[in-house]
Amino acid sequence: MYQLSANIELLFTEAGDDAGDRVRAAAAAGFDAVEMWFSTDKDLDSLEKALADTGVQLTSMLAGPRMTYTYPGTDLAPFHQGLDLAVEHARRLGCPRIVLASGMGFPGMSRQRNHQFLVDMFGEALERNRGADVDFILEPVNSRVDHPGALTDRTEDAVDIARAMGTDRFGILYDLYHSIVQGEDPATELAGAAGLVKYVQLADAPGRHEPGSGDVDWPAQLAVVRASGYDGPIGLEYFPAVESAASVGYIRSVAADA
């Protein structure tokens, strides 16, 4: 049985704008885990108290800003400052993973050079945060629908970068929605990413709504995830087409059998 983590940016918005209230709504709906995007737009006192009061775990959060890092002359100070702050907030909130973005690729460079730039930048970030008890995970996102121009738009891109980092503290976020929309076969990609997948997310396709709303065979795909050896939490990062609590019924039944 997989632990499901509700994305409080997209789910339980019925509870209002406060992240703490959304955590409480998720807990009331039976969740013991949530994920979120950035921490800098949150009332951290409210969020921290809600997590403590409910016992809900924060499974992942994003580091910002999401920049076009590889463009020549880009000032990387905002990236490093943003990641340092994300680490500080993650430690405060008990979050074990911070999600990193690749930004856009520079068209004047080869893909290999763009990737090497990211390896160098992330290597510096790891060194700056050597004592942080958090994992850094790079997210490949589809460029066909949601993120045109994304540098790491294929799972193998993120895998190559993660391997080059050479540390257990760095891995990838494998998002079934992004991978499927990009035209990838999850079984193939997960086999190629063996040992590097530190987090999984999902949404149905097409539409990026709740599982059961699109064409994805979720029992089959969660079986693929299980066969790959991944047994961590699965983030529900979708735009619900119905009320949040109602939207999770199908994927809960599938995850219970996976």
Image (cartoon, grey):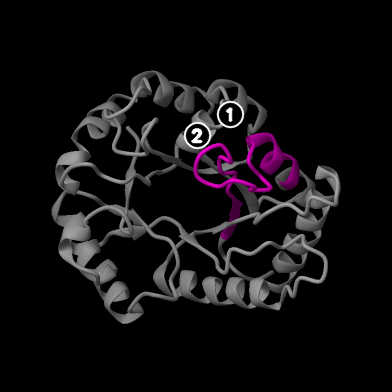
| Mark 1 nearby-residue class (10 Å; few <14, some 14–19, many ≥20) | many
Q: Mark 1 points at which residue?
A: 190
Magenta residues (range): 135-161
Measure the C-alpha gap from mark 1 to mark 2.
9 Å
Position of residue 142 measured from the top left corner of the image (x, y, whole percent): 56, 40
The residue labelled by disc 2 is 230
The amino acid at mark 1 is Leu
Residue 118: percent from left, percent from top: 75, 56
Quarter holding residue 254 = top left
Amino acid of disc 2: Tyr
Q: Which residue is drawn at 36% across and 20% down?
A: 217
Element type at marker 1?
A: helix
Which image quadrant: the C terminus? top left
Against 213, residue 25 (above or below) is below
| Foreground tag (1 vs 2) | 1
- Where is residue 52? Give x, y as percent: 27, 70
Q: Which mark is residue 234?
A: none
The answer to if 143 sits in the magenta stretch is yes
Q: Is the residue under label 2 in contact with that under label 1 (CB below 8 Å)?
A: yes
On the picture, is 195 further left or further right than 69?
A: left
- Give residue 242's quadrant in the image: top left
